[in-house]
Amino acid sequence: MFDQARPVALLLARIAIGVIFLVHGYQKFATMGIAGTAKFFESAGIPLASVAAPAVAVLEVVGGLALILGAALPIVGTLLAIDMVGAIVFVHGASGFSAGEGGYEFVLALAAASLAIGFTGGGALALDGVLSRRRGAASVSA
């Protein structure tokens, strides 16, 4: 039973975490704007804030979509986890653990979830898995 539920559980996790990243990245474009995001990054002490702001916004949008689709999961999961480590170091770490007080609790959970999803293969419903099975079938028939 657990083996049958695993692909669906991974799909739901990919969608949930992917949507969170997608929305946060979209906010950096639409709500705050890249200039506003860069200004915030600069105030937080993030190096090269004017470069980091669009890079992080794109990573979170594209990475969120990739998680949802189950595409390039090890790469995307690692990059999103690194993104969240940066958020802990530069923004949330000084506020302690509790997310209610601006701490790193939620950001740490996103980092861990990104890595876990990234290195599970994403389940049978992930694009990575579909492509892998097709490559395997093509090499067997050749």
Image (cartoon, rainbow, N blue to C red):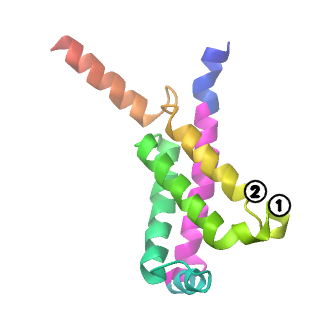
Magenta stretch, overall SS: helix
Quadrant of the image containing the C terminus:
top left
> Which stretch appears magenta?
10-34
Q: Secondary structure at mark 1?
A: loop
Mark sitting on residue 105: 2
CA gap, disc 1 to disc 2?
6 Å
**Residue at the (69%, 50%) spot, across then down:** 109
Vertical placement of 141 versus 96: above or below? above
Q: Is residue 8 left or right of residue 80?
A: right
| Amino acid bearing label 1 | Ser
Name the mark on residue 59.
Answer: none
Q: Position of residue 136 (x, y in %)?
A: 29, 20
Q: Is residue 122 left or right of residue 106?
A: left
Q: Is residue 84 above or below residue 101?
A: above
Residue 74 image point, x, y percent: 44, 41
Q: Earlier in the sequence, mark 1 or mark 2?
A: 1
Using a 10 Å C-alpha cutoff, classify the residue at mark 2 as few (fewer than 14 neighbours), some (14 to 19) or many (20 or more). Answer: some
Question: Residue at image x 61%, y 28%?
Answer: 8
Is residue 142 covered in magenta? no
Does the magenta segment cover residue 19?
yes
Residue 98 is marked as 1
**Residue shown at the point (68%, 12%) measured from the top left:** 1
Secondary structure of the residue carrying tag 2 is helix
The amino acid type found where label 2 is placed reads Glu
Q: Do the numbered discs 1 and 2 sit on residues whose CB atoms are within 8 Å?
A: yes
Residue 32 on image: x %, y % = 59, 81
